[in-house]
Image (cartoon, grey):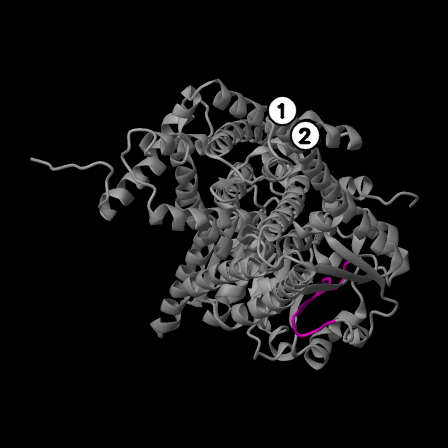
C-alpha cells in the first residue's frame, strides 16, 4: 500500500525525521547519561548512508550544517565575557599556542615517521590535529559556565589555533596554485587586514544605529544573523575560513546583546533547537563504521590518528594546568572544549583529497579521509563526556548559599504608566534583578478608582502585557498587578509592602522635564513612604546600546545600609552590558567601591576618579556623552550621606544632562528619615552610625579595604 524508497527524498518526510531525531535522541541517551550531542551524532550514523540509509546527506544538510557550525562559533564569541577576555587574553593566547603547537608537532612527526606520508601531507595532517571546533560549547552554556576562566581560555585558544591552522592551510593551497609567489602573500595580508578593520570598526557602529532605531524582535534577529554571514563571507573572500568570520562577528557585537535579554534568548533558542542539531546529525552521516573492517593498514591509520589527536590535546591541557596551578576540573574543561574535531578538520581533509599534486595523485587519500572521520567521532564523544563532567562539577562547587542569596532579598518592581518606556524599563530591570530568585520581577500599573475614563486602565493592562512578553522572551518570569487607588503613590507603596519588594524602578519619558516631574506629588510621596531602593530612569536609547556607565557617588555613601545593594545592581548591569563603568566619588568612598568590585566582579572594566565638589555636577559634562548612562546616587533628607546640594539635582540634571540617559538612585535607608540626622550635624554622627542593621555591619566588615 505504501511505496517507500530509501533513502527518503521527500522534503516533508526528511524534515519530519530530522525533528524526531532532535526530539528523541537526547531523551533516549540521557537515561544512559550520554550527552545529547553524542546522541545526535550517533543518530546521524544510523540514518545516514553508512547506517540504515534512511536519509541522504543532501544540500539541506550542507546548508543547515554550515549554518550550525557558524552558529556554534558565533555563540562562542557572543557569550564571551569581554572583561574576562581582556583579563585572561594573554593566558588564552598561551594556551592557544600550546594546544596548537603540541598537536602540530606531534602530527607532523607521526605523519612522516610513523605513517610514512610526505612532508606536505604530514603538514596538512598536523593542521587537522592542531585545529579544533567548539562542539561541546552548548553544554557549557546549559550549565551557565560561559564566564569560567577555563572556558574563556579555551575559547581564546580556539580562535588562535583555528586561525593559525587555517593560515597554514591557505599557504599549502597557495603553494600548489599557479602563480603563488611573494605577491600572493602580500595580497593575502592586505586582504586580511582590510577585512579585520572593516568588521571591527564598522559592525559595532552599524549595530548600535540599528538597535536604536528598530525594536522589532524579528528584524533584530535577522539583522544579527545577516551580520554573522556577512562576516563569514568576507572572511572567505580574504582567504580565511568562514568559522573565524562568525566568531569575530560574535566578539565585535558582544556588548550590543546582553547575556540576559530577549534577543539573546531568541538567538540561543533557534540555534540550539534547529541549526546546531542539524550540523551534528550531518557530521554523524559522514561516519562509516565499516571502515574499521578495511584491513590492518586502514585500522593502523585510524588508531594512530585518534591516539595522536586525543593525546596531544590532553597534553596541552595538562601542561596549561601545571603552569598556572589550576585544578582538575579546569583541565578537564579545557581538554573537553579543545579536543573535538569537526567542521574544520573535515574541511581540511576534503581540500587535501581534492588537491592534485601530480597527474592522478592527490595530497590525501580515502584512508586519511576515513581516519579523519573516525577522529571526529572519537573526539566528539570524549569532548562531550569531559565537558559534561567538568561543567557539572564546577557548577556544584561554585554554587554557594551566600552567592545564591545575592544582595537583594526582595522582588524588583517596575511601575508602568507611559507605553513608550515599557521596553526600556523592563530591559533595565531584567539586568539588575536577582537571577536566583523565582519571579524576581513584579510589574505594576496603578490608576485612580474614580477615573471615569476606562482608556487609562486599559492602557495600563496593555503595558503590563507588553512587559510580560518582553520578560518571557528573555526567559524571565514576571508577575503583574493592576490596581486602583485613591492615590497613585500609596498604591505603589502598599504593593511594595504586600509583595516584599526590594527595589522599585520608575520611568520618566525623555520629553518630560525632570525639574517639574521628579519632585512632583507622586515622586515625593514614594520616596517619603518607603525606605527601599528607588531608581528613576530616563533612557534616550535602548540599554544594550549604552557604551559607558558614569556613576556619581556622594561622600559617606558607604555608611548607608543599602550601599552594597545598589552597587551590586550596577555591577550586574555592567556585567550584562560589558561596557566600561566610571565611578566619580571621594577617595575614601571609592576605596570601598573598588574593594567590592574586585572581590565580587573582578571581570568588570572599571575606572575610579575623584570628585572633589559635589555641589556642581557641571564637572561631569565632559565625561558623559549621548550614548552613556549617567547614574547619580542620591539620598533622602536626614540620612547620613545626604547633602544639601541634592535639592538642586533636578535643576542641574535638566540644565546639564537634558540630552543624556540618566538614572537617579535612592538607596535603601532603614528607619524613619525624620529621626535621622545627616553628617552635617556633627553631634549626631555616632548616633547615626549606630543605626545600621546586622546586614549592613556584615557587609561593611567583609568588604572593608585593606589598611582602612
Residue at the image position 49 percent from the left and 59 percent from the top? 229
Which type of secondary structure does the marked residue at label 1 adopt? helix
Magenta extent: 624-639
Extreme residue in the top direction: 296
| Residue 676 at least partly seen | no
Q: In the rendering, which numbered label is found on residue 702? A: none
Percent across and percent down for residue 64 are 40, 49
On screen, residue 707 versus residue 358, left or right, reads: right
Percent across and percent down for residue 688 are 82, 52
Mark toward the start of the polypeptide (2 vs 1): 2
Extreme residue in the right direction: 707
On screen, residue 655 versus residue 61, left or right, reads: right
On screen, residue 222 versus residue 617, left or right, reads: left
Which type of secondary structure does the marked residue at label 2 adopt? helix
Residue 194, quarter of the rendered image:
bottom right
Q: Are marks 2 and 1 in contact (CB under 8 Å)?
A: yes
Extreme residue in the left direction: 1
Q: Is residue 621 above or below residue 482?
A: below
Q: Is residue 619 magenta?
A: no
Residue at the image position 76 percent from the left and 46 percent from the top? 90
Residue at the image position 72 percent from the left and 40 percent from the top? 97
Question: Disc 2 marks which residue?
Answer: 109
Residue closest to the eye, 701 or 162: 162
Quarter holding the N terminus is: top left
| Residue 180 at least partly seen | yes
Percent across and percent down for residue 493 are 55, 58
Percent across and percent down for residue 458 are 36, 68
On screen, residue 42 versus residue 425, left or right, reads: left
Residue closest to the eye, 287 or 250: 287
Cα gap from disc 2 to disc 1, whole angstroms: 7 Å
Question: Disc 1 marks which residue?
Answer: 114
> What is the number of callouts on the image?
2
Amino acid at each position: 500500500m505504501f511505496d517507500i524508497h530509501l533513502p527518503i527524498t521527500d522534503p516533508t518526510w526528511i524534515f519530519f525525521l530530522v525533528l524526531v531525531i532532535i526530539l528523541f535522541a537526547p531523551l533516549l541517551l540521557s537515561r544512559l547519561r550520554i550527552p545529547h550531542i553524542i546522541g545526535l551524532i550517533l543518530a546521524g550514523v544510523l540514518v545516514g548512508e553508512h547506517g540504515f540509509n534512511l536519509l541522504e546527506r543532501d544540500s539541506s544538510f550542507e546548508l543547515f550544517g554550515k549554518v550550525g557550525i557558524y552558529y556554534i562559533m558565533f555563540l562562542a564569541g557572543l557569550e564571551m565575557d569581554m572583561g574576562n577576555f581582556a583579563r585572561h587574553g594573554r593566558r588564552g593566547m598561551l594556551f592557544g599556542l600550546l594546544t596548537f603547537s603540541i598537536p602540530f608537532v606531534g602530527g607532523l612527526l607521526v605523519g612522516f615517521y610513523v605513517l610514512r606520508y610526505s612532508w606536505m601531507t604530514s603538514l596538512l595532517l598536523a593542521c587537522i590535529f592542531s585545529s579544533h571546533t567548539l562542539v561541546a560549547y552548548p553544554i557549557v552554556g546549559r550549565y551557565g559556565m560561559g564566564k569560567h576562566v577555563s572556558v574563556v581560555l579555551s575559547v581564546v585558544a580556539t580562535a588562535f589555533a583555528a586561525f593559525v591552522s587555517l593560515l597554514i592551510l591557505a599557504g599549502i593551497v597557495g603553494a600548489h596554485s599557479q602563480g603563488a609567489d611573494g605577491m600572493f602573500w602580500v595580497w593575502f595580508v592586505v586582504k586580511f587586514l582590510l577585512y579585520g578593520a572593516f568588521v571591527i570598526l564598522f559592525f559595532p557602529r552599524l549595530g548600535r544605529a540599528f538597535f536604536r532605531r528598530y525594536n522589532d524582535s524579528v528584524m533584530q534577529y535577522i539583522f544579527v544573523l545577516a551580520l554573522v554571514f556577512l562576516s563569514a563571507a568576507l572572511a572567505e573572500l580574504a582567504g580565511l575560513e568562514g568559522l573565524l568570520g562568525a566568531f569575530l562577528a560574535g566578539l565585535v557585537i558582544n556588548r550590543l546583546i546582553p547575556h540576559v535579554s530577549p534577543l539573546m534568548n531568541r538567538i540561543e533558542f533557534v540555534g540550539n533547537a534547529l541549526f546546531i542539531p542539524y550540523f551534528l546529525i550531518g557530521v554523524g552521516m559522514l561516519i562509516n563504521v565499516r571502515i574499521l573492517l578495511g584491513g590492518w593498514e586502514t585500522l593502523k591509520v585510524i588508531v594512530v590518528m585518534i591516539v595522536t589527536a586525543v593525546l596531544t590535546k590532553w597534553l596541552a591541557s595538562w601542561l596549561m594546568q601545571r603552569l598556572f596551578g589550576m585544578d582538575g576540573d579546569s583541565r578537564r574543561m579545557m581538554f573537553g572544549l579543545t579536543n573535538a574535531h569537526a567542521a574544520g578538520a573535515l574541511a581540511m581533509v576534503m581540500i587535501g583529497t581534492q588537491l592534485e599534486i601530480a597527474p592522478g595523485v592527490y595530497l590525501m587519500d580515502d584512508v586519511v579521509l576515513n581516519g579523519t572521520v573516525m577522529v571526529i567521532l572519537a573526539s566528539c564523544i570524549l569532548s562531550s563526556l569531559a565537558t559534561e563532567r567538568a561543567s557539572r562539577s564546577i557548577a556544584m562547587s561554585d554554587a554557594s548559599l551566600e552567592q545564591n542569596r545575592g544582595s537583594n532579598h526582595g522582588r524588583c518592581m517596575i511601575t508602568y504608566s507611559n507605553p513608550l518606556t515599557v521596553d526600556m524599563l523592563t530591559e533595565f530591570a531584567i539586568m539588575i534583578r536577582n537571577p536566583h530568585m523565582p519571579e524576581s520581577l513584579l510589574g505594576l500599573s496603578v490608576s485612580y478608582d474614580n477615573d471615569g475614563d476606562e482608556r487609562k486602565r486599559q492602557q495600563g493592562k496593555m503595558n503590563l502585557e507588553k512587559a510580560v512578553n518582553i520578560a518571557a522572551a528573555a526567559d524571565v518570569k514576571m508577575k503583574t498587578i493592576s490596581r486602583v487607588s485613591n492615590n497613585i503613590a500609596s498604591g505603589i507603596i502598599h504593593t511594595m509592602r504586600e509583595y516584599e519588594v526590594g527595589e522599585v524602578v520608575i520611568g520618566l519619558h525623555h520629553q518630560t522635564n525632570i525639574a517639574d516631574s521628579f519632585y512632583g506629588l507622586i515622586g515625593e510621596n514614594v520616596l517619603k513612604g518607603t525606605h527601599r531602593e528607588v531608581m528613576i530612569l530616563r533612557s534616550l536609547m535602548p540599554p544594550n546600546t549604552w557604551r559607558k556607565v558614569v556613576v556619581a557617588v556622594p561622600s559617606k555613601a558607604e555608611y548607608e545600609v543599602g550601599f552594597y545593594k545598589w552597587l551590586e545592581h550596577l555591577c550586574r548591569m555592567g556585567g550584562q552590558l560589558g561596557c566600561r563603568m566610571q565611578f566619580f566619588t571621594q577617595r575614601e568612598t571609592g576605596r570601598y567601591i573598588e574593594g567590592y568590585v574586585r572581590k565580587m566582579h573582578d571581570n568588570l572594566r572599571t575606572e575610579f576618579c575623584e570628585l572633589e565638589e559635589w555641589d556642581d555636577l557641571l564637572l561631569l559634562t565632559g565625561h558623559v556623552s549621548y550614548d552613556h548612562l549617567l547614574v547619580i546616587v542620591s539620598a533622602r533628607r536626614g540620612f547620613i550621606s545626604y547633602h544639601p546640594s541634592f535639592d538642586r539635582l533636578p535643576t542641574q540634571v535638566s540644565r546639564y544632562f537634558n540630552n543624556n540617559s540618566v538614572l537617579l538612585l535612592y538607596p535603601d535607608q532603614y528607619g524613619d528619615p525624620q529621626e535621622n540626622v545627616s553628617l552635617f550635624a556633627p553631634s549626631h554622627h555616632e548616633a547615626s552610625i549606630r543605626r545600621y542593621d546586622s546586614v549592613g555591619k556584615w557587609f561593611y566588615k567583609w568588604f572593608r579595604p585593606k589598611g582602612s
